[in-house]
Amino acid sequence: MDKLIISGGAPLGGEIRISGAKNAVLPILAAALLADDTVTIANVPHLHDVTTSMELLGRMGVGLVVDEKMNIEVDPRTISTFEAPYELVKTMRASILVLGPLVARYGAADVSLPGGCAIGSRPVNLHVKGLQALGADISVEQGYIKARAKRLVGNRLVMDMVTVTGTENLMMAAALASGESIIENAAREPEVVDLANFINQMGGKIEGAGTDTIYVQGVENLHGTEYRVMPDRIESGTYLVAAAISGGRIKLKNTRPDIMDAVLQSLREAGAIITLGDDWIELDMEGRRPRSVDIRTAPYPAFPTDMQAQFTALNAVAEGVGTITETVFENRFMHVHEMQRMGADVRVEGNTAIIRGVKRLTGAPVMATDLRASASLVLAGLVAEGDTVVDRIYHIDRGYECIEEKLAQLGAKIRRVPS
C-alpha cells in the first residue's frame, strides 16, 4: 500500500490537463451493456474505480480492449453471466449501476448490495422501487438484489429523494422499456446529462436530462457507438483549490467552466481572480492568502458535496472564520480530525464545521478515510510546514489520475513511496 509524502510551502503554478470524469465514465461503462454491438469510450481516466468496473464487466464475459490512450472498446455480445459479485461491489458502490442495464437488456441481474466509501447511508431502495415500478420482479437474498423481467414497461417514477446513481440506473433501464417513462425529482448533475447523451448516441430517446424531470421513450434496441466522456469537474475544482490555498496561479485545460458555477463563485469569494474560456480556466491568487468562505452543500447546481473537504482545507489556512454545512451525507467530516492533527482550528457542530483560519499548518502523519477526504489532506499538506505523510492513498487512486505527477508539474514537492 502506497503513501504520499508532501513537503509544503511552495506556491503552485503552471498548466495541467484535466482527465475524463470518474462519475460520468462509470455509468457510461455500465450503459454499454445496453448495446447490441461494440461501443468505444474515449477520454477515460486511468483510475482504480475504472479498473474495478472493467473487471466487473470482464467477469460477466463482456469483451474489453484498451488502447494506449485508455480508449476502451466494450463488446457486450459475449456476455455469459449477469452477476455482480460481492468482492467487487464492496470496493465500489457504483457497481450497482449494472442492475438497470442487465435487467432491461437481458431480463436478469444478480447484484450484491454495495460497499464503497464510508461517508454515510446511501440506500439502494430507490433503485429497487423504481425497477419494480417498471415491472421487474425483485427479491433480496443472501445479500444480493435479484431482478427478473421479460420486458420492462414504462411508468411514472417519482424519486423520494434526489439520487444520482438512482436516476442513472432507472434512466438506463427505461431506455429499453416498452413505452414512455417519466423520472420526477431526478438528479440534475452534468454526469447524468453525459449518460443521457451517450444513450441517445446509441439510438436512445431521452429528453430533459439536466432538469428535474426526465422523459425516456423506450426503444427496441440500442446500437454501438463511439463516445468521448466529459471532463471531471471535481478534479478541476480540486486543482483550483490547490492553487488558491498556496497563493499560486494555475491554468486548467480540457475542462468545462460552464458546469462549475458554484465552485468558481466560492473561489472568487476567497479572493481568486478567475478567467474563463470555453474549455479552460485560469486562477490567480497573486500570492495572497485566501479569505474564508461559507459553504452549504446540496445537489447540483448548488455546491457539490464532493468539493466540501477541499474547501475545508482552504478555510483552515484562510483569513477569518468560515462555516461549511454538509446536507448531502451525514458522515462526511472525517477529514477534520486529521486536519486538527496538522493544527487546523475546526469545531464540528452537527452537520456544520466552523473553521477559524490559521496562518500555517504543520506537517503530520495523516490517514485518508474516503476519496475526497484524501484529496483535502494532500491540499493541506501543500501549505503545511515540514512533511505531511498521507497514508491509505488507495482512496485517492479511485478518483484522481496521477495526482502526484500533476501536482509535481505545478511545482509541488510530492512523492509516492511504498508503505
Image (cartoon, rainbow, N blue to C red):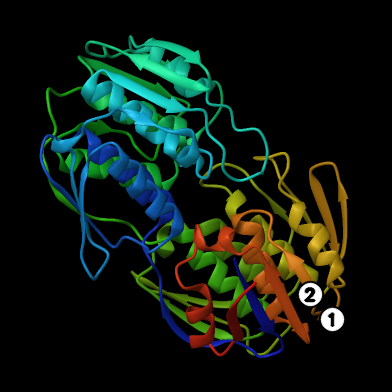
Tag 1's secondary structure? loop
Between marks 2 and 1, how big is the CA–CA gap? Answer: 6 Å
- Measuring from the top left, give residue 362's x and y in whole percent: 83, 80
CB-based contact (under 8 Å), mark 2 and mark 1: yes
In this rendering, the answer to whether 84 lies above or below 261 is above
**Residue highlighted by disc 2:** 317
- Give the mark nearest the N terminus, 2 or 1: 2
73 relative to 274 in the view: left or right:
left
Residue nearer the viewer, 170 or 70: 70
- Measuring from the top left, give residue 208's x and y in whole percent: 32, 34
Residue nearer the viewer, 24 or 388: 388
**Residue highlighted by disc 1:** 359
- Hey, what amino acid is under mark 2? Val
In this rendering, the answer to whether 145 lies above or below 291 is above
Residue nearer the viewer, 395 or 85: 85
Asked which quadrant contains residue 50, the reply is: bottom left
For the point 74% across and 78% down, the residue is: 388
- Measuring from the top left, give residue 325's x and y in whole percent: 75, 48
150 relative to 295 in the view: left or right:
left
Quadrant in which the N terminus appears: bottom right
**How many marks overall?**
2
How packed mark 1 is, by other alpha carbons closer than 10 Å (few <14, some 14-19, many 20 or more), is few
Residue nearer the viewer, 246 or 342: 342
In this rendering, the answer to whether 142 lies above or below 346 is above
For the point 62% across and 69% down, the residue is: 267
For the point 25% across and 32% down, the residue is: 206
- Hey, what amino acid is under mark 1? Lys
